[in-house]
Image (cartoon, rainbow, N blue to C red):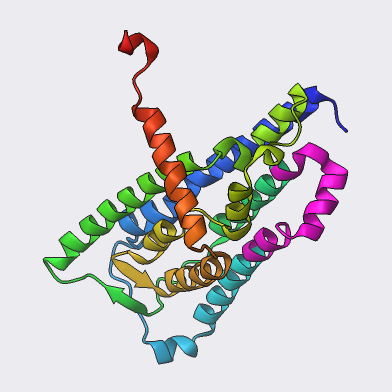
Amino acid sequence: MAPALLLVPAALASFILAFGTGVEFVRFTSLRPLLGGIPESGGPVARQGWMAALQDRSILAALAWDLGLLLLFVGQHSLMATETVKAWTSRYFGVLQRSLYVACTALALQLVMRCWEPVPRGPVLWEAQAEPWATWVPLLCFVLHVISWLLIFSILLVFDYAELMGLKQVYYHVLGLGEPLALKSPRALRLFSHLRHPVCVELLTVLWVVPTLGTDRLLLALLLTLYLGLAHGLDQQDLRYLRAQLQRKLHLLSRPHDGEAE
């Protein structure tokens, strides 16, 4: 086991990488399709139909590249979440197991975003071109994206964000408090075993609600929707626990401080 002085910087580095990747993911999924989308030449892009696109090798090559990137991310995210890999990484990395998972996920997502191949000449499923839709649809999408990201950040309050990022595990280890999950209630452990991602609906809104749904965006939205759907297995008992936790934390946030009460 590495000394405590080495554990803390490693966990912090993983957290910073994950935070920066999250900011970049907001830009990739929201800012670029909502505020970007203008071709470099400044003129309109000649788009092909669906049948012509299926015969265009450049479009097919770009889509195959993007599909490979997404499968790499999904494979890493799923493989490292299996009990076998968790046991192996815990054996060799100890308390840094969660930080390693978070760092690898961030690196895989960075690879997707930095190597993503847009398909500007591909067909579109929908596009707001005529007025007033060309003005109001992007504005409506922007508002829905802002609401979705605010909800995502709010939902993270229900969960233990420091534990999700691997910081709490290192903190508890340095102080000799043991494993944080060992202190969780059976209801919380049951929820975590069913919930692979706490913000499915909001992420789906971000993925699909765009003024122009091009070919590469459609591929991104379809594959991640399928992945989130397969990974999401909540039942009524999990939802009741989530509702109770949200009400408890909202009560704590709304409770006046001691100084104000006096």
- 117, 143: nearer the viewer: 143
Residue sitting nearer the eye, 248 or 129: 248
Residue 255, image quadrant: top left
Q: Nearer the viewer, residue 195 or 224?
A: 195
Relative height, residue 35 to residue 251 (above, below) = below
Q: So how many labels did they put on this image?
A: 0
Residue 199 shows in this picture: no
The span shown in magenta is: 73-98
Residue 185's image quarter? top right
Q: Residue at x 35, y 52 (%)?
A: 148
Question: Looking at the figure, which quarter contains the C terminus?
Answer: top left
User: Residue 109: x and y, percent?
Assistant: 59, 55
User: Can the viewer see residue 239 in this picture?
Assistant: yes
- For the point 47% across and 73% down, the residue is 222
How far across and how far down the image is residue 245, in percent?
Answer: 46, 42
Q: Is residue 181 magenta?
A: no
Compared with 68, 247 (above or below) is above
**Chief SS of the magenta region:** helix
Reply above or below: 222 against 169. Answer: below
Q: Is residue 81 magenta?
A: yes
